Amino acid sequence: MTLKPILEGEKQYLVPLYQRTYAWQRKQLDRLWADIVAQADALRDGTTNPGHFIGSLVLAPAPNQIAGGISRWLVVDGQQRLTTLMLALAALRDHVHAESPREADRIHRQWLVNEYQSGDDKFKLLPTQTDRAALRACIEHTSTPTGGNVAVAYRFFVEQLTAIGSTDDPHDIRRIEQAIVTRLDLVSVTAEHNDNVHRIFESLNNTGMALSLGDLLRNHLFMLLPTRADEVYRTVWAPMQKLLGPDNVETLAYLDLVLRGHPELRRSDTYQGQQKRFRDIGHDEAAVEAEIVELARRARHLHAILKPAELKDREIADGLTRLAVWGAEAVNPILMVLLDRRERGLAASGETAAAMLHLESYLVRRMLCGRTASGINRAFAQAANAIADTPDAAETLREILSQPRRYWPDDDQLTENIAQLNFYWAGKARQRLFVLRRLEESYGHKELVDWDETKVQIEHVLPQTPTPEWLELLEPDVEPGESPDDLHQRIVHRLGNLTVTAYNPDLSNKPFAEKRKLLQNSNFSMTKDIAERESWGLQQIEARGAELAARAAQMWPGPKATRTAAPQDQWQVVRRICAALPEVCPRAPGRPTVTSPPLPASTPNPWATTSRRTQCPTPGASSGLTARCPPSSAGPSRVALISLAMSSPPKVCASTTRGERRHPSASPLATSPL
């Protein structure tokens, strides 16, 4: 079937509310125009080649048909190509109007309107309400359409027709019209009166015609509003979708379910979850409408999270902006609750800002201590539901995040890890720059740096590629058995050695004396502070690391003190003891060893998880060793010391050190690096 029988006669094609708005871009328009020109050329050459297939058109009878009136059809699928062809015909009419008003009038009456109808019935195509005004402007030609994809497509065809109109053949334009209405083939599929067009729409998506979750959700919800669909779409859904943008409707639907008590929900299950939620109220239009209104209310909170700069409350806007820069979407359920409480008058801005600072501190401190983000999505979703109706959301959130298994590092842990860990490899690049930016801001500038305009980079004061001069400076601080290169690798990426600068290439790996001169001219206080040092080595890096750790502890308040240490903290105690004591296990090559005679088979092993005796893997070691290391004659064994530090005996070879593999009979808990 071609477009000619589809448009002839008094017909109207309605694009349902659940359809997406017109979305064709230049790529699709170029392809269609090439097909039209190819068919026009075939007409010129007199070839009998068949027309060009451009896709399918799935139609269903529109409800409330009036006997003797125009024939109305719902466009279940194919509205994008049908709208595009109508825009091409409107542009063709306007192109010929200057030379032949009569011909333009014929095109208008024959293809674009129902000549003897009025109002909306006059138009052969009635798109979704979002596109309706733009298409009406094109068809009526009362004003020039502006903005949106409909206007862009109309202007595209005007430009293409102008280029063709400049040729010597006056019949080219006429052949373009013939090609559009008689040479582009469509497969027209018509549903029966009792078919559910919403179900057809879903099935088309399931067979590969990609639609967004927002499209499917809109389809499902408006299927439940047989008499209120137009009004609810116009007054509630369309403004919400305009506020968020189509892509973020899916995010809103997901957060809505999380906040309704489904913290374990996966994003991919959002549509099914919403379907299930509306199943019990699907028979009640008023209840469905109320839920859509509530969804639109929550859309304002999501919009504030996505566009914090538009908020008037600067304290809240700044907190949201910092979390957005950090880039953790896992905090969004908590932020939605905080903004909801603020909107309902249950919390002042101060409480909301304090809660956001707790979130920021939790994320930053974990990153500074080398913790991954694993598991925080569900933890934050659970916390969001827990703080919803508490008297003080900020304090409740702090208590939840301070629980031992949440691992929110305290000040001592923060200071220790900043002194030892390679900050440059922690987290993501934007998060590392965020930490340095916040530390820089803690110096209290009178003139704030424009971070968006300034191309700030992270600078290694002790360079990543050291020159012999730099290695010579490190020589006095090397430990026994360590080289300057080893020391360099150990400290070069620590926070104490890093700063921010806008002229990183100029600094390169220059000697410190030359770097000092450049750093003195910096607008960054933390960088100027480095220039005040006479030299730069291990001691200066450690001292500056301690200074920055103190600033970090003050800027990002830590957890509430708890009576018992977390299991992770207990293992930190074990690791520190292991690192401090001499090695006694005979499986460690090159270390002092103490042997003990084999134990009789009947001797119980107080530390082993089973009574099974285990061979020590070191060649030549005593075959009588059990899972624990033997005691040292020089003093108490490590196992004995560890047992004093923990509430239960460790199931780990106590002599394991950094980078070594665990003893074959040790518990899996021993696999974490010491």
Image (tube, grey):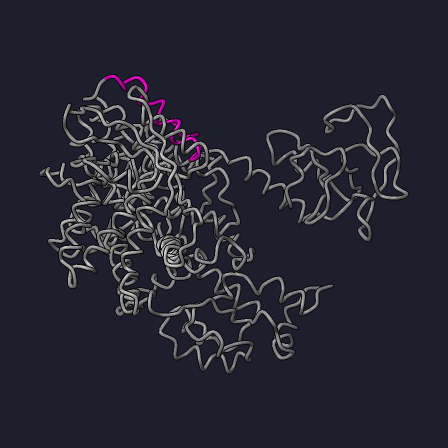
Q: Is residue 554 visible?
A: no
Please, is residue 400 above or below residue 634 in the view? Answer: above
> What percent of the width, then of the height, locates residue 230?
18, 32
In magenta stretch: residue 156: no
In what quadrant of the picture does the N terminus appear? top left
- Give the residues drawn in magenta, as a range: 262-283
Instruction: Tell which residue pokes out farthest to the right in this image.
Output: 620
Q: State the residue in front, 457 or 164.
A: 164
Left or right of residue 652: residue 329: left
> What percent of the width, then of the height, locates residue 347?
21, 37
Please identify the quarter of the rendering in which residue 421 is found.
bottom right
Residue at 33% across, 68% down: 453
Q: State the residue in front, 120 or 239.
A: 120
> What percent of the width, then of the height, locates residue 194?
30, 19
Please, is residue 469 above or below residue 19 in the view? Answer: below
Left or right of residue 509: residue 432: left
